[in-house]
Amino acid sequence: MTDHAEIRKRVASLRERMTELNLDGFIVPRADVHQGEEVPASEERLTFISGFTGSAGSAVILNDKAALFVDGRYTLQAKLQTPEDCFEQVDLVERPPAEWLKAVVSSGQKIAYDPWLHTKSQVDALNRACKDRDAECLSVDKNPIDHVWESRPDKVSTDVFVHPLNLAGQECAKKIEVVGEVLEQNGADLVVLSLPDSIAWLLNIRAADLRSTPVALSFAVVKKGGSLLWFIDERRLSQAVKEHLPISVSIHDPNSFEAELRALKGAWQLDATSAPFQFFSIAEKNGCEVVTGPDPIIALKAVKNSVELNGMRAAHDRDGVAVCRFINWLNQEATERAESNEPVTELEAIQKLLDLRTDVKGFHSTSFDTICGSGANGAIVHYRANEESNRSIQEGDLVLVDSGGQYLDGTTDITRVVVIGEPSVDMKKHYTLVLKGHLALHAAVFPKGTSGQEIDCLARQYLWQEGLDYDHGTGHGVGAFLSVHEGPARIAKARVPLVALKPGMVLSNEPGYYKAGEYGIRIENLEIVVSRPDLDNDGREMMGFETLTFVPYEKRLIELGLLTSGEIEAIDRYHQEVWDKVSPGVNGDDLEWLKVQTQPLNKSLGE
């Protein structure tokens, strides 16, 4: 955690630079030029200037005040990481930066932004807010934070490797052809791609430019005729990668990207929600028509083919072995050492889980930084343990572990809660309410055209009945050996464009409950959207979910009296599947533990 005094100095330095540039304010998003969720260390400008390390947020720094915008997942974390006398904390959902600016900006002030770090949608909102106050919103050629950022980390550039057909399931030449057809249908001549996971999926390549997302940071242009310009350093491409690429793909120096964009003519398809605003600015200066529409890759890669789904199933089965071994270890070690001078710490648990995953066939990296929150730390929704916050796990703690792995054949994301010692009555009640919602969402069946927002309440209903809720989405899309968070579909109550769930999509199912200062509970499995032809009555196409994740629930936290007979049967069926899939991969104490954890509830907990 960065010292608060250092944050104050950095903000003061930025304000001095703003004065030199005749600016009254500067907007700092958590984003890089690719607008992806995972941002490389060299682009973490929001963390540098505020100390906040969450995966979503932004800041506005004026000459006399500043605000940090975070959503409900990060309210507690932001308070710890960011000096309150320097930044006002604002709810990102209820009052985004544009709304805040509308209330505080004065006539004649100049508020600046970096056009590479904002989307058109964001810039449009900022422009409207400033215009309402008779202020000016303008772009800058050079980011002023870079001027004051000393000891900035170097950019990471790794070797690209082929994601083979037996894992991808479709040749990249065919994928490019399909994108060309989409462009033709949309009346566009080309699309400029900025999302690295879109390019990785399209070209069937992977790399390790980011810690947890196996992509190469690059740009691409796809033309409707089926050709593709890929802007990447050719030295990163082995002969095998070059031979893998179809003849329609040409390699271009990344330093020439902006110049080559300025030479492109015709109608450009650009995504107003993900493409940098600079693309729109260049297209306008070129006199090119802009066809505003989503990055066409997002919808295509969200629906996994049969090869990708089989890979995801296999990866989850192997990952389940590692997670089960970890939970057994944590139970034993934390219990035995809780009263010693060397209790298990959060960072130690994180390292142990990584070690176990590293032993699994096909492991590439974690799919995100593991969340291991014990006790009160578990109530911080996206808590990240560090040397300063690292807590010793104690008797009576709930330990929330949210983690995932990137495997060559799939991406995993799982959350389980482990109780050390005896749980309290409230712990069992809250865990069981969350579990009931988790089971209800998994059991959902719904007609074609249903969005995730329309079924989100199924996961919250039992918490709502007790006056409780959680401030995060219930489910996000997951890539196949790609981003652990991918669009366009999600399960949430947020007011966002409705996206219909389709067979082949993979989403998380992760309701939770967080008791500030005491504990956090979240239960997460990944689910495949599947067709349910057995329910296609009256000609209606019905769908449901198939579970990918197989690790036992924490039976010591289940309050049987709160479950229906149907819910008990569903848990028992699930635990039998866990045994069938995981038991062949474990032995010794781990096998004995798994046997106990997967026994029927009434047998193991008593009538």
Image: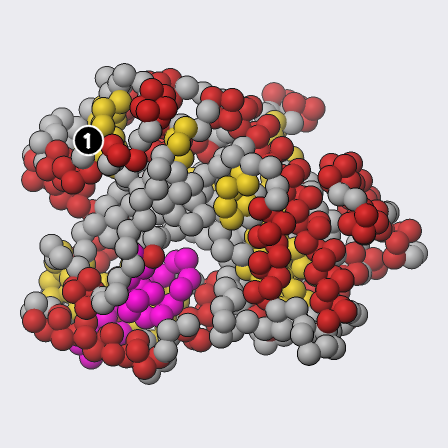
Q: Is residue 391 visible?
A: yes
Q: Number of marks in the image?
A: 1
Q: Which residues are magenta?
A: 42-66
Q: Position of residue 23 (x, y in %)?
A: 11, 68
Q: Position of residue 157 (x, y in %)?
A: 31, 44
Quarter in which the N terminus is drawn: bottom left
Of the pair 444 and 267, the residue shown nearer to us = 267
Instruction: Classify residue 525 as left or right of residue 172.
Output: right
Of the pair 168 and 511, the residue shown nearer to us = 168
Which three-letter amino acid code belongs to the residue tagged 1?
A: His
Q: Position of residue 607 (x, y in %)?
A: 92, 56
Residue position marked by numbered label 1 in the rendering: 252
Q: Against 158, is 98 above or below?
A: below
Of the pair 351 and 249, the residue shown nearer to us = 351
Q: Is residue 112 magenta?
A: no
The residue drawn where x is 50% and y is 41% is 364
Q: Against 547, is 391 above or below?
A: below
Q: Is residue 64 magenta?
A: yes
